[in-house]
């Protein structure tokens, strides 16, 4: 009997509590009391489970995709190139592998996307052209007040020491796996050179050597288009390499003084 009385008292307390409050929450259920003039109604709302079910032991959820973060890199490089001979009309005859180019500098790449980057270079370049003089009369425009016989000329070279800067766009054929690699890429850009030292040297059988610096005959500025294809090699410890082609589309010589010019194409390899 006592148990029945206690049960009735508990039910009465709970009912009174529900009536007294506008809403009571029990677990995921919420009871709301709506009072009318003659009676009261209780509305029950079930909330969704705030925590989604956890995956089972054998179930794995897909990992979120990584977003690309922009970054830049800076690398030193050295390169060697050879002038492509052009024996056509209007050029000096360039002889063999002695006509060469050496580059030493720094390259910076700004990676804006996984397969695209912008880059710049700043470098020192040395050019050496070994020439065969077809018309000695043009030498008189360089070496003033001197005449030369073709058969007396033993050797002639034109050399320049340049400071060069370039800007390029890089397209990845094979995107790099991480920031320490370069994948397989193609660079297309333009380069400007300033020759702070330029001169012509001549060696004759009869009178020895002559050297002439002439700012009027030799242009100090030049512009070139450059293309490069590079990758990380599998030899020499996985160092990075690139083949390049440089095409100079401005004249090296003042055509009003020397109506001939140097071959414009240089091909070579760079090491990073």
Image (tube, rainbow, N blue to C red):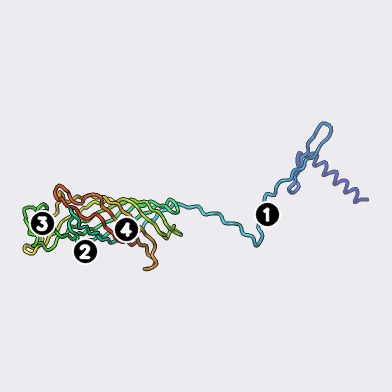
The label nearer to you, 2 versus 4, is: 2
Q: CA distance from mark 1 to mark 3?
A: 92 Å
Q: Name the secondary structure under disc 3.
A: helix
Marks 3 and 2, Cα distance to the nearest angstrom?
20 Å
Task: Mark 4 or mark 1: name the one nearer the start of the chain.
Answer: 1
Q: Which residue is mark 4?
A: 244
Where residue 263 appears, x then y in whole percent?
22, 55
Nearest the camera: 48 or 256?
256
Residue denoted by label 2: 96
- Circle 4 sits in a helix, a strand or a loop, which is it? strand
Q: Which residue matches tag 1?
A: 53
The C terminus is located in which quarter? bottom left
Mark 3 and mark 2 lie on one chain; the one further toward the N terminus is: 2
Between the C-alphas of marks 2 and 4, the distance is 19 Å
Residue 122 percent across, percent down from the top left:
30, 54
Residues at discs 4 and 3 in contact (Cβ within 8 Å): no
Closer to the N terminus: mark 2 or mark 4? 2
Q: Position of residue 11 (x, y in %)?
A: 85, 45
């Amino acid at each position: 009997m006592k148990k029945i009385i206690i049960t009735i008292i508990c039910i009465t307390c709970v009912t009174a509590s529900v009536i007294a409050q506008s809403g009571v929450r029990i677990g995921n259920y919420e009871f709301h009391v709506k009072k009318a003039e003659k009676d009261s109604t209780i509305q029950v709302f079930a909330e969704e489970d705030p925590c989604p079910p956890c995956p089972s032991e054998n179930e794995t959820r897909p990992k979120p995709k990584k977003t690309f973060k922009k970054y830049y890199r800076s690398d030193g490089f050295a390169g060697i190139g050879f002038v492509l001979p052009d024996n056509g009309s209007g050029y000096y005859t360039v002889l063999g592998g002695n006509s060469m180019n050496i580059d030493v500098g720094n390259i910076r790449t700004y990676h804006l996307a996984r397969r695209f980057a912008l880059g710049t270079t700043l470098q020192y370049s040395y050019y050496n052209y070994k020439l065969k003089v077809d018309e000695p009369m043009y030498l008189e425009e360089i070496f003033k007040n001197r005449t030369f016989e073709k058969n007396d000329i033993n050797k002639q070279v034109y050399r320049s020491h340049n400071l060069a800067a370039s800007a390029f766009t890089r397209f990845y054929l094979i995107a790099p796996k991480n920031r320490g690699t370069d994948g397989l890429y193609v660079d297309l850009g333009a380069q400007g050179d300033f020759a702070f030292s330029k001169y012509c040297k001549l060696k004759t059988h009869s009178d020895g050597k002559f050297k002439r610096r002439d700012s009027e005959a030799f242009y100090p500025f030049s512009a070139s288009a450059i293309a490069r294809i590079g990758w990380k090699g599998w030899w020499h410890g996985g160092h990075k390499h690139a083949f390049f082609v440089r095409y100079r589309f401005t004249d090296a010589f003042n055509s009003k003084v020397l109506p001939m010019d140097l071959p414009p194409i240089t091909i070579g390899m760079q090491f990073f």
